[in-house]
Structures are given as structure tokens and as C-alpha cells.
């Protein structure tokens, strides 16, 4: 069965009860609309989440009864609001949206397994919290995949690769090459290795949380935070995606073997 045949939206209403059972897994891509430098589109994170979900369903759909849901294209992007086109939802709106979507699928189908595929790092903190409420409120098994973080692939560069750099550009070259426009990067663009310290302090330090902006000159250039996007390749992107997909089997098994909380009496 192809990914298209496993898109919930392609089912007719009289197929829902027979096609989607308690052991099925609904896969919900979640992205963002935000600046990704001059060379990548606003929809980069949504494209990555959606295309990774398609590959996930193509690979494991038959063996684990996976079904693709339409992507949620907006997320939490306050660090990018300086840039035209960035759309960020208030935290309450984002969490209420996730709650409402989960509630409706729990109401209208027999499915009790929800796998969210997150394409945007800025969504991570909220998603890590909201899974508890979704499980308790709607009695579903739920988890979140972060594809880029799942892949242990070493990529060059002295600065941590956070946003629109080597890794993300490589993934887009593998998933949606027509949307990558490296020629738009100015000829004098060179990642500054001196950014590494502030990237680690402001973004990666687990001991202290800071609000930060992607136009902060102490850690970014052109809205890019990390490695040289011009060194990106579809081959590296495929390697990242493949290694992430390899790790998904254990995640799906753990999800489907969990026991959902009993219904509220």
C-alpha cells in the first residue's frame, strides 16, 4: 500500500471504522512557518515533518498499521518574528489546537495511538509537556518524534548546527530540492566560528533557559545558526533521514505496546 492509500483524508466515512482500529497509529506532522535564511522557504519545518511522515508511513505502514494525517503548518516561532513572513502561534492557541485535534480523532475513530512528527525545534518544549495532558485527557498512547535529533550523523563545522545550516539544508535537498536556492546566499557569506560559544550558552545550555532571537549577531548570520549551508548535500540529507527512520521501529513498537489509560467513568 502506498503512502497515499494510507492518508486518513483519502478514506470515505464508511471506511473509517474498518480501516482504523485501536491498534492503528495516526501520524501527525507538525511544523512551522518561519524564516530559514535567504535560501530555504518559510515552510521548511513543515516540509520536513510532512515528508518524513510520508517516508515513515511508506516504510512501516503495512507492518505497524500507520496512517498519515494532514500537517499542522504553524508552531511556536517567537525567535524569528523579526523576519517578514514568520507566523507564530501563542502558546495557549498551539496547545489548544493540539488538544482539539487529538480529541476529535479520539472521538471520531477507534484509534488510540498518536505519533507526532515534529519538524521544528522551537515546538519541542511545549510538545514534551502536552503529551502528558493528551494521554490523560483523551486516554491515548502518544509520543513525539524529532527526526533531526534522532539521527546520529556527524556533520562538519565548528558551530552547533541549529537552524537553516548544513543539516537542515541537506535534509531539504533530499526531501524537496526544488525549494533549496543556495545561489541566494551572498558570495561573502562565511559562518563565524566565534558564534559557537553564544549558541551553546543561549540555545543549548540545559542549565539555564534564555529567550533568544535568530537575528542576534553574536550567534547568527542571515538568520542562519550553524554550519555552512553551501556545504549541504542530498547525500548527507538522505543519511540523516535514513538513520532516523531506522530508529523509528523501536519507537512504534513501544508506542503500540503501551496500555492506554482506562476511560474516565
Image (cartoon, grey):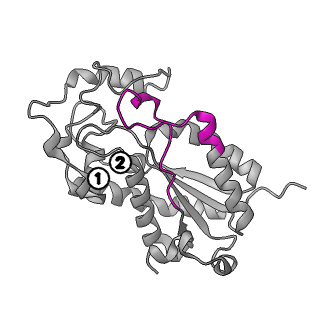
Camera-nearest label, 1 or 2: 2
How many circles with numbers are drawn on the protein? 2
Check disc 2 and report its element: helix, strand or loop.
helix
Residue 154 in sight in this render = no
Per the image, label 1 sits on a secondary structure element best described as helix
71 is within the stretch colored magenta: yes
- Tell me whether the residue at label 1 lies in contact with that at label 2, contact meaning CB atoms closer than 8 angstroms: yes
Residue at position x 34%, y 57% in the image: 241
User: Mark 2 — residue?
Assistant: 44
Residue 51 visible in the displayed image: yes
* The quadrant where residue 202 appears: top left
Seen in the image, is 248 located left or right of residue 259?
Answer: left
Residue 69, given in percent of the width and then of the height, sits at 54, 63
Q: Is residue 101 magenta?
A: no
* Tag 1 residue: 172
**Which range of residues does the magenta coloring cover?**
70-96
Where 4 sits versus 76, above or below? below
Q: CA distance from mark 1 to mark 2?
A: 7 Å
Query: Which class describes the residues within 10 Å of circle 1: few (<14), some (14-19), or many (20+)?
Result: many
- The picture places residue 114, in percent across and down from the top left corner, at 61, 59
Residue found 19% across the figure and 30% down from its top: 191
Of all residues, the one furthest to the right in this rendering is 265
Q: Residue furthest front?
A: 84
Of the pair 183 and 235, the residue shown nearer to us:
183
Asked if residue 169 is positioned above or below residue 249 in the image, the reply reads above
Q: Position of residue 244 (x, y in %)?
A: 40, 56
Amino acid at each position: 500500500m502506498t503512502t497515499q492509500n494510507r492518508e486518513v483524508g483519502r478514506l470515505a466515512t464508511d471506511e473509517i471504522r474498518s480501516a482504523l482500529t485501536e491498534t492503528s497509529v495516526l501520524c501527525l506532522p507538525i511544523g512551522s512557518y518561519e524564516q530559514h535564511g535567504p535560501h530555504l522557504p518559510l515552510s521548511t519545518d513543515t516540509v520536513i515533518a510532512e515528508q518524513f511522515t510520508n517516508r515513515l508511513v511508506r516504510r512501516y505502514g503495512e507492518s505497524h498499521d500507520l496512517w498519515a494525517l494532514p500537517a499542522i503548518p504553524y508552531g511556536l516561532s517567537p525567535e524569528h518574528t523579526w523576519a517578514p513572513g514568520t507566523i507564530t502561534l501563542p502558546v495557549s492557541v498551539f496547545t489548544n489546537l493540539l488538544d482539539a485535534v487529538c480529541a476529535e480523532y479520539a472521538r471520531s475513530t477507534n484509534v488510540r495511538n498518536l505519533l507526532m512528527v515534529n519538524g521544528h525545534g522551537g515546538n519541542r518544549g511545549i510538545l514534551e509537556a502536552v503529551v502528558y495532558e493528551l494521554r490523560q485527557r483523551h486516554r491515548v498512547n502518544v509520543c513525539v518524534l524529532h527526526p533531526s535529533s534522532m539521527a546520529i550523523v556527524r556533520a562538519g563545522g565548528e558551530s552547533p548546527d541549529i537552524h537553516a545550516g548544513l543539516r537542515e539544508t541537506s535534509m531539504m535537498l533530499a526531501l524537496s530540492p526544488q525549494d533549496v536556492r543556495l545561489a541566494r546566499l551572498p558570495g561573502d557569506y562565511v559562518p563565524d566560528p566565534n558564534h559557537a560559544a553564544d549558541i551553546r550558552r543561549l540555545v543549548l545550555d540545559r542549565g539555564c533557559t534564555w529567550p533568544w532571537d535568530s537575528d542576534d549577531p553574536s550567534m547568527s548570520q542571515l538568520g542562519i545558526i550553524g554550519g555552512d549551508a553551501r556545504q549541504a548535500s542530498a547525500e548527507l540529507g538522505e543519511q540523516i533521514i535514513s538513520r532516523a527512520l531506522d530508529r523509528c521501529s523501536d519507537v512504534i513498537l513501544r508506542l503500540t505496546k503501551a496500555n492506554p489509560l482506562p476511560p474516565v467513568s
